[in-house]
Amino acid sequence: MVQGTANWNTEITKEWLQSYVDDWVQFYKKETKEGKVASYIPVLKKADPNLLGITIIGKDGMMIQSGDVGTPFTIQSISKIFSFIVACMERGVSYVLDRVDVEPTGEAFNSIMHLEMRKLKKPFNPFINAGAITVTSLLNGKSSEEKLEPIFQLFTKILGYRSRINEDVYVSERETSVRNRAIGYYLIELGYLESALDLTLDTYFKQCSIEVTTEDLAKLGLVLANDGIDPQTAEEIIPRNVVRLAKALMLTCGMYDASGKFAAYVGIPAKSGVSGGIIATAPPRVRKETLPFIEGCGIGVYGPALDDKGNSIAGIKLLKHIATKWDLSVF
Ligand code: DON
């Protein structure tokens, strides 16, 4: 039985929260058995399906980590938040939104259907592959290195070290991703790609192959929770209007065709990736009683066994449990 009918009105200590989270991670680890690691990018098959880890970092710097937090993994679709943010910062929000919409699809992340049906005339949102590839084509630069540099710089500011690309995962996706290539050709036909297809896809595969840890995701999530300001330095790293858009997209489209359920049962902006990562961002709550991380927190989860929508199966259950116990929902 999971512990946890807590009375949070008493003093909240790190040790106390740590023991709850340890207990919850232990409990949900067995759910990993119900999922499968992604296999359509061949190298991702090597991941250990039994892993589950979480890092939570509060505005005051308090960090709770539990489970398998030591294993680096590729950021995959979580990168789409940051390519969107950088494109908005480089090109302006309205320029980007003229080329990609902000509507959830209710379809799988790699669906081509809406593009072909041309319901909206532009990709539905920046988090489905069609929208993300369009956004990557908008990034300034003549090479993938130039295009990705501002994302690396943003990460370096927040994480305190320069991230690296996992070469094996990048090559594995580049060699096999026929569907993204197909999406790319549709986008050329519709006139949305601003860079050559090969350059755009190469940049996109590289951005998806950036290696992160749960701690990195929690730090990135915390800056989003704190409206783009790094709580440690008080520096505004991302403009407020861009963060607001990014979080709205995370809430409505971040978990693909499971976004509605995630909003209803977890209720915080989040984004998943097929390697099993989830970034979540809990803004400050307005309550009289004391609650854990009342000033907001960033959360990073890793659990490579996925459900049928492509989201970490145990990770979602763990997040749902924590959000319920700590009343993290924005609603
Ligand atoms: O383009 C792809 O298929 C992957 N590089 C990323 C997909 C992804 O992470 C979707 N996640 N749920």
Image (cartoon, grey):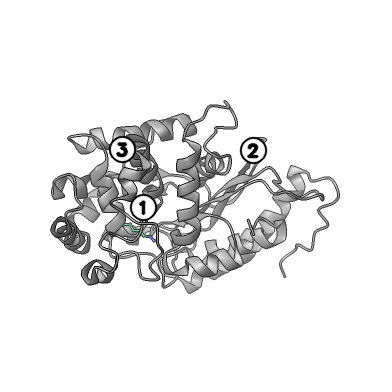
Label 1 to label 3, Cα distance in Å? 23 Å
318 and 191: which is toward the camera: 191
Q: Residue at label 1?
A: 76
Reading the chain from its start, which is encountered first: label 2 or label 3? Answer: 2
Q: Nearer the viewer, mark 1 or mark 3?
A: 3
Reading the chain from its start, which is encountered first: label 1 or label 3? Answer: 1
Left or right: 131 with respect to 246?
A: left
Residue drawn 22% across the image and 39% down it: 144
Residue 50 shows in this picture: yes
User: What is the crowding at mark 3: few (fewer than 14 residues within 10 Å), some, or many (at least 20)?
Assistant: few
209 and 201: which is toward the camera: 201
- Percent coordinates x, y for residue 319 in the rendering: 59, 60
Q: Secondary structure at mark 3?
A: helix
As drawn, the label of residue 59 is 2
User: What is the crowding at mark 2: few (fewer than 14 residues within 10 Å), some, or many (at least 20)?
Assistant: many
Residue type indicated by callout 3: Arg
- Percent coordinates x, y for residue 121 in the rendering: 25, 62
Determine whether the beta carbon of the residue marked 1 sits less than 8 angstroms from the nearest atom of ligand 1.
yes
Q: Secondary structure at mark 2?
A: loop
Label 2 to label 1, Cα distance in Å? 26 Å
* Residue 181 vertical placement versus 94 (above, below): below
Q: Secondary structure at mark 1?
A: helix
Residue type indicated by callout 2: Lys
- Percent coordinates x, y for residue 315 in the rendering: 53, 61
Say which quadrant the N terminus sits in: bottom right
Say which quadrant the C terminus sits in: bottom right
As drawn, the label of residue 91 is 3
Residue type indicated by callout 1: Gln
Q: Nearer the viewer, mark 2 or mark 3?
A: 3
